[in-house]
Amino acid sequence: MPVSKDLSFKKQEASLALPAEIVGSFTVEGDDSSTKLGRISLYQGTSQEQAIYGEGVFRRGDFVDCLERRKIASNFIIPIHAEIKYQRWDDGAKLPAYTYSAKERHLIPAEDLAWDGANPPVAAKLIDMVVVVRGEMYPYLFTFKRTALRAGELILQYEKRRGMKGLRFGMYELGSEDEKNNGGNVFRRLTVKNPVDATEDTFEVLASVTQALAAVKAQAAKAVAIDDAPF
């Protein structure tokens, strides 16, 4: 179920120099607030996705704007803000049993965080990340969960290292590759390449999003909806 984008950002004049306020202020926190951003998803070609988007519209591995139901302009993203959360999904549920931020992790029952042999904890970790997409004029929410979590955690590690070095926003190329799950079914696993510095053609939207960062954080804080369902 697509979600709406209700932010409007003041258009900035194009600049050939990185605006002074953009200093690589990537943040990670467990916040609380209101509505949701438009989303990006990695298209897997499932029956559920085909029911939403139609058959033959996208190819497996495409990155999709869930609101406009089109491919995004490029596979290059610039992380702006991230929130680590934990969710429990019960079989057949359309909404999670609970969602807690990293700051609320102590509220999760201990047994929900424990591994059961080879079975992962029922309180699944996810990363909601606000990103700018090269070629797009609005920020998006990209959720890294389940098989994509590894890529999201890699971005967090890179950004922490870049922050320690005083580097500015990093840009990452997303991709995907075929992999089989425990049941032998093939899916596309999200991949990410080493970052490069944000390019000049992204400065305008970066300036807009940076100036509106408080509102963007508020929209990302409660990204809980039916479209979070674990297809």
Image: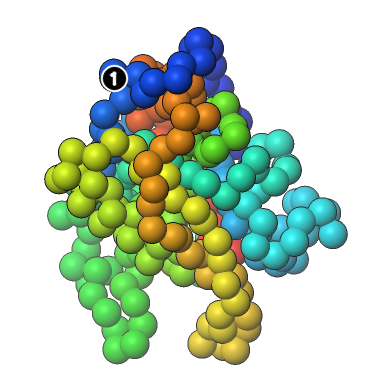
- Looking at the picture, tell me which residue is in the foreground, 30 or 42: 42
What x and y, as percent, mark residue 53? Answer: 77, 51
What x and y, as percent, mark residue 125? Answer: 33, 61
For label 1, the residue is 21
What x and y, as percent, mark residue 155? Answer: 34, 54
What x and y, as percent, mark residue 169? Answer: 33, 38
Q: Is residue 6 above or below residue 141?
A: above
- Looking at the picture, tell me which residue is in the foreground, 163 or 189: 163
Q: Name the residue located 46 percent from the left edge and 35 percent from the top edge.
A: 199
* Amino acid type at image mark 1: Glu
**Considering the image in quadrants, where does the N terminus appear?**
top right
Q: Name the residue located 34 percent from the left edge and 77 percent from the top edge.
A: 120
Picture quadrant where residue 92 is located: bottom right
Q: How would you rate the neighbour count of disc 1 (Cα within 10 Å): few for under 14, some for 14-19, many for 20 or more? A: few
Q: Does dot 1 land on a helix, a strand or a loop?
A: loop
Q: Is residue 213 above or below residue 112?
A: above
Q: Name the residue located 70 percent from the left edge and 65 percent from the top edge.
A: 60
Q: Is residue 14 left or right of residue 188?
A: left
Chosen colour scheme: rainbow
**Considering the image in quadrants, where does the C terminus appear?**
bottom right
Q: Is residue 103 left or right of residue 155?
A: left
Q: Is residue 122 visible?
A: yes
Residue closest to the far front: 16
Q: Name the residue located 39 percent from the left edge and 48 percent from the top edge.
A: 196
- Looking at the picture, tell me which residue is in the foreground, 132 or 109: 132
